[in-house]
Amino acid sequence: MSPDIINSLASNGLSPSGIFSGNPYFSAGFGLIGVGAVLAVLRQGSRKAAAFTRRQLLVTLEIPSKDKSYQWILAWLSDQQKLKSSSKKRIFSKIIQNATKPRHLAVQTTFKQHDNGSVAANFSFVPGPGKHLFNFNNRWIQVDRVRETKMLDLTNGAPWETITLTTLNKDRDIFNTILYNAQKKAIEQQKGKTVIYTSVGPEWRPFGPPRKKRVLSSVVLDNNISEDILSDVKDFIKNGKWYEERGIPYRRGYMLYGPPGTGKTSFIQALAGELGYNICILNLGERGHTDDRLNHLLTVAPERSIVLLEDIDAAFNKHRDRSDPNSVHLSMVTFSGLLNALDGVSSAEERITFMTTNHIDRLDSALIRPGRVDYKVYLGNATKFQTATMFNRFYPESPSLAAEFAEKTEGHQISPAQLQGHFVRFKTSAEMAIENFNLLTAKQDI
Ligand SMILES: Nc1ncnc2c1ncn2[C@@H]1O[C@H](COP(=O)(O)OP(=O)(O)OP(=O)(O)O)[C@@H](O)[C@H]1O
Ligand SMILES: *[C@@H]1O[C@H](CO)[C@@H](O)[C@H](O)[C@H]1NC(C)=O
Ligand SMILES: *[C@@H]1O[C@H](CO)[C@@H](O)[C@H](O)[C@H]1NC(C)=O
Ligand SMILES: *[C@@H]1O[C@H](CO)[C@@H](O)[C@H](O)[C@H]1NC(C)=O
Ligand SMILES: *[C@@H]1O[C@H](CO)[C@@H](O)[C@H](O)[C@H]1NC(C)=O
Ligand SMILES: *[C@@H]1O[C@H](CO)[C@@H](O)[C@H](O)[C@H]1NC(C)=O
Ligand SMILES: [Mg+2]
């Protein structure tokens, strides 16, 4: 007699000994075979019935880790967990909740730097791999997080995952609500922040958490340079139709050039914040880049973003001699590849590109011709106006000293970055900053 049958009998609430004693057929052994056969049929039948019901009554939503909404859903699920444990509920639902609480959690740590420099870490628990049940708007939803063990996501080395949400067919509209809520939460978190994207393989990935916006007025440029660029970009953004009607590619390229530490990078960051745009940093020297990939990346850049190419002169000049064994140059991007990606037949239609360089004279004229670079601005060492304005920003309580300080810079070449360093050093006293002015000029002789 197979133990399997006894088990199934026992689980049906029948004790085997009770059946054996009263029924003569069982002693002959027929009974067992019969019961076994019936049970087998029933079991198979119920399995089929279950599969049928699942098909008819349940609806599932699969979210692969490649999809954008994947992280949103995870964060949202983690939030649901937090809401639950805090809310007061009747004892019955508490017990159910106890039973359905995920037993397998995964941790997600976020860091946040305070303005005073101290770092705080927050842990949030997200459902780990496995099946979890949770209740949302009084409807039950099963979350199944599956980790693919054999396949790695080559772009970031993490295992492929899928989250499958299952709920009753009649509740299928809840998926929309969930996705919408998760997306809303994710977007709210980015509000007032700038997301920096970098290229990972053939796609763009957020680099670190969204940054706080930098105020445009914190980057002090000479005269009206800042306002002029801002109005030019704004003008470009709202004139899509104009470009379309004239059959011109809807692209605009900007070039900021000048000595180091004059605010090129900072200005672009602040401008993106002002416009509510994100920044896509394209590193031409990255290994594995090819002309095709460069073109692809520029085509698939996230919406409402500025493509930033930093130190464009270094990308091709420093390592131009590829036969030099000392030059570690694994990027396969060619100069003509860049030219075509920026303004060629197959280049992307809608784009704002910013380039920075310290040496515009080293750039090929093909790169900075209109169409690739439509707007060139020189950001130079601090003028008197910039010096005084920066002084006022750092010492708002002593405006009368700004002119005196600016006067001292006469005849010296000082970059805004140096000024910033000086003011940070003497941040408590404007008088000290003036007294120690000679440190500022001495430093640059080193
Ligand atoms: N015009 C400016 N107004 C205010 N701060 C500035 C200005 N220029 C530079 N700084 C400060 O100096 C630092 C360096 O600036 P930034 O990185 O923008 O320089 P950069 O022009 O991009 O230099 P590089 O050519 O070396 O990349 C930043 O911390 C920034 O706050
Ligand atoms: C929930 O489970 C925890 C431990 O698993 C137990 O201490 C607690 O009493 C349970 N709560 C309810 C309401 O059952
Ligand atoms: C950490 O969590 C607390 C409370 O949930 C929240 O107030 C705080 O802003 C969070 N900090 C970070 C770094 O996310
Ligand atoms: C920094 O600021 C945070 C909150 O703003 C505070 O909790 C922390 O104690 C501060 N750290 C220091 C070293 O002042
Ligand atoms: C800057 O712009 C303002 C107003 O648009 C104007 O009054 C001022 O003269 C400009 N300054 C310079 C130096 O161009
Ligand atoms: C700007 O200032 C730096 C540092 O003081 C100096 O080395 C450089 O030559 C100056 N550049 C120009 C164009 O004046
Ligand atoms: Mg820079």
Image (tube, rainbow, N blue to C red):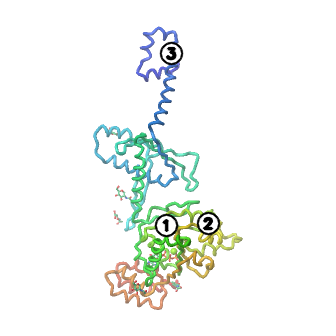
How much space separates mark 1 and mark 2, taking CA atoms? 20 Å
Name the residue type under label 1: Ser
**Nearer to me, 23 or 398:** 23
Local crowd size for mark 1, using a 10 Å CA cut-off: few (<14), some (14–19), many (≥20)? many
Disc 1 or 2, which lies upstream in sequence?
1
How much space separates mark 2 and mark 3, taking CA atoms? 75 Å
Q: Is the residue under label 1 in contact with that under label 3 (CB below 8 Å)? A: no
Disc 3 or 1, which lies upstream in sequence?
3
For disc 1, the marked residue is 305
Residue shown at the point (42%, 84%) measured from the top left: 387
Residue found at the very far right of the displayed protein: 323
**Nearer to me, 278 or 48:** 48
For disc 2, the marked residue is 346
Q: Is residue 252 above or below residue 173?
A: below
Q: Is residue 34 above or below residue 168?
A: above
Question: What SS does tag 2 mark?
Answer: loop
For disc 3, the marked residue is 32
Residue shown at the point (65%, 71%) measured from the top left: 336
Question: What SS does tag 1 mark?
Answer: strand
Q: In front: mark 1 or mark 2?
A: 2
Name the residue type under label 2: Ser
Q: Is mark 1 within 8 Å of ligand 7?
A: no
Question: What SS does tag 3 mark?
Answer: helix
